[in-house]
Image (spheres, rainbow, N blue to C red):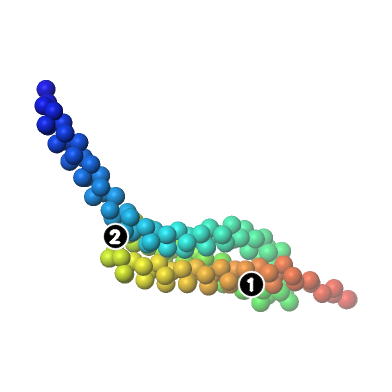
C-alpha cells in the first residue's frame, strides 16, 4: 500500500506533467488560430466546387462560353493543387514557430487567391446569358 507521501508525490508529479503538456498548446495557440483561419477560407469555398462542376457541364457545348469554362477549370485546378500541396497540420505544428507561422501565412494568401479565382469564375459563369442563335 502506498503511503500518503507517495500518493501526494504522485499527484504533484502528474500535475507538473499536465502543466508541461499544456504549455506548448498555449504557446502555439496563435499558430493554431492562424491554421484555423486558413482552413476556414478553404471550408468556405470548397463546397463551391460542385457549382463549378455544374456550370462547366451547362456551358460545355456553348462555344462562346469557352473562356468561362477555361476559367472555371483553372479555379477548380487551383483548389485541387492547393489541397494537394498543403502540408498536414501535424507536420506544420512540429516546425519552429516562426517558420510555421510564415508557412501558414503564405498558404492563407494562396487559398485567398484560390477563393477569389473561384468566386470570380462562378459569378461570371452564372451571369452569362447565351445569345440566341439566329439561323
Q: Is residue 33 left or right of residue 28?
A: right
Q: Which residue is found at the position 64% from the left and 72% from the top?
A: 120
Please name whichever residue, 110 or 100, is drawn nearer the observer in this view of the structure. Answer: 100
State the mark number for residue 94.
2
Number of other residues with Cα within 10 Å of mark 1, as a class: few under 14, some 14 to 19, many 20 or more = some
Query: Which marked residue is nearer to the observer: mark 2 or mark 1?
Result: 2
Quadrant of the rendered image containing residue 119: bottom right
Q: Position of residue 39 (x, y in %)?
A: 47, 60
State the SS at label 1: helix
Residue underneath mark 1:
120
Q: Which residue is found at the position 51% from the left and 59% from the top?
A: 40
State the SS at label 2: loop
Q: Which residue is found at the position 30% from the left and 65% from the top?
A: 97
Please name whichever residue, 31 or 69, is drawn nearer the observer in this view of the structure. Answer: 31
Residue at the extreme right of the image, as rendered: 135
Q: Position of residue 45 (x, y in %)?
A: 57, 62
Instruction: Say above or below: 106 vs 83.
Output: below
Quadrant of the rendered image containing residue 103: bottom left
Q: Which residue is found at the position 85% from the left and 75% from the top?
A: 133
Please identify the quadrant where the N terminus is shown: top left
State the mark number for residue 2.
none
Instruction: Say above or below: 3 vs 24.
Output: above
Amino acid at each position: 500500500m502506498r503511503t500518503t507521501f507517495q500518493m501526494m508525490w504522485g499527484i504533484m508529479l502528474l500535475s507538473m506533467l499536465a502543466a508541461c503538456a499544456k504549455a506548448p498548446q498555449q504557446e502555439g495557440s496563435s499558430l493554431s488560430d492562424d491554421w484555423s483561419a486558413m482552413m476556414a477560407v478553404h471550408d468556405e469555398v470548397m463546397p463551391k466546387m460542385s457549382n463549378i462542376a455544374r456550370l462547366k457541364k451547362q456551358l460545355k457545348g456553348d462555344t462562346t462560353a469557352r473562356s468561362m469554362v477555361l476559367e472555371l477549370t483553372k479555379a477548380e485546378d487551383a483548389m485541387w493543387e492547393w489541397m494537394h500541396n498543403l502540408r498536414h497540420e501535424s507536420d506544420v505544428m512540429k516546425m519552429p514557430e516562426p517558420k510555421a507561422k510564415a508557412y501558414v501565412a503564405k498558404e492563407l494568401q494562396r487559398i485567398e487567391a484560390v477563393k477569389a479565382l473561384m468566386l470570380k469564375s462562378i459569378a461570371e459563369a452564372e451571369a452569362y446569358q447565351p445569345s440566341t442563335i439566329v439561323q
